[in-house]
Amino acid sequence: MTNEWTVTPEYRETEAGSAFDSLEKVFALEGEAVASDGESCVFPFQVGGRRYYVKRYHTTKGLRSYLWMSRISVEWRNQLRFLRWGIPAARVVAYGQCRLLGKTVRGALVTEALENTKDLAALALEDSPLLSDARWVNGLVERVAAIARTLHSHGFAHNDLKWRNILVRTEQGEPEAYLIDCPAGQRWCWPFLEYRIIKDLACLDKVAKYHLSRTQRLRFYLRYAGRQRLNPQDRRRVRRVLGFFSGRE
């Protein structure tokens, strides 16, 4: 059995670096789960007056677990990619996995908490007044469009770009958006990339159509495409986005 564990350089000489300096230590931590599924759980943990989120995979499934592409390894690689590409995202503190006979059997990812944030899906569910503030929404549209444009410009598709995976600051002032939770994202080559781009944009619009105006949704696409108006190619893509979930909702 082989353990692979990394503490990112900026945290190695900190209290957090000490608290999360091995996979064994991370799996010995206790906390109340805020999210869980058949493979993983997430819980907050406080060190030195700061909050962190620990995501532990207690099992891994599928062929990818034998090919160095387990969900946990893909998730930390993508999180590090986002930061390298200048996409606002939670800072990575530590990450790693345990492998047995070539298979990932467990792993973990620790990130620093983004304080005073909520995911967009939660704002929509509670009918937040922020979504009725045209100025705030326009700022949000700009930031989410920039995130999507950066992802796709690198030939990367998130594959689950839903409102629940975008955190926003709920304080007064200009909105800030952060990308989280991406264990299924990857790079694609053409022509497969175009389908994945359509899916990403459709996932965003699936909720947006109930909470944003048509003008705001159009503004999003124009900012994403970097244009002042739609061209024929854009119109074809927009039709595909609008019809992507037709009959499946």
Image (spheres, helix red, strand yellow):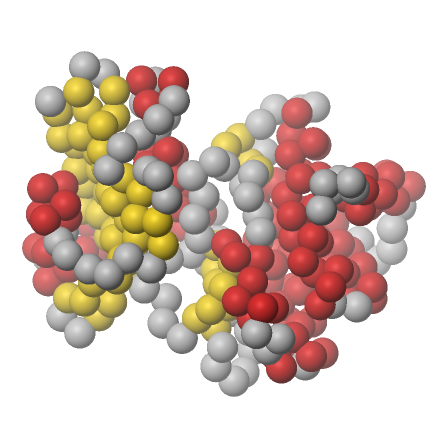
Say whether residue 216 is left or right of residue 13. Answer: right
- Residue at (43, 48) in percent of width and height: 181
Say whether residue 38 is left or right of residue 231. Answer: left
Q: Is residue 124 above or below residue 11?
A: below
> Which quadrant would residue 68 be assigned to in this image?
top left
- Depth check, front residue: 24 or 144: 24
- Residue at (61, 49) in percent of width and height: 148
Q: Is residue 22 visible?
A: no
Q: Is residue 87 above or below residue 104?
A: below
- Where residue 59 appears, x then y in whole percent? 27, 32
- Residue at (18, 56) in percent of width and height: 11
In the rendered image, the residue lying farthest to the bottom is 172
Q: Is residue 53 above or below residue 67?
A: below
- Depth check, front residue: 31 or 113: 31
In the rendered image, the residue lying farthest to the right is 232
In the rendered image, the residue lying farthest to the top is 101
Q: Is residue 160 visible?
A: yes
- Residue at (72, 41) in percent of width and height: 248
- Where residue 241 appears, x then y in whole percent? 77, 43
> Which quadrant would residue 240 be assigned to in this image?
top right
- Where residue 88 appears, x then y in whole percent? 46, 58
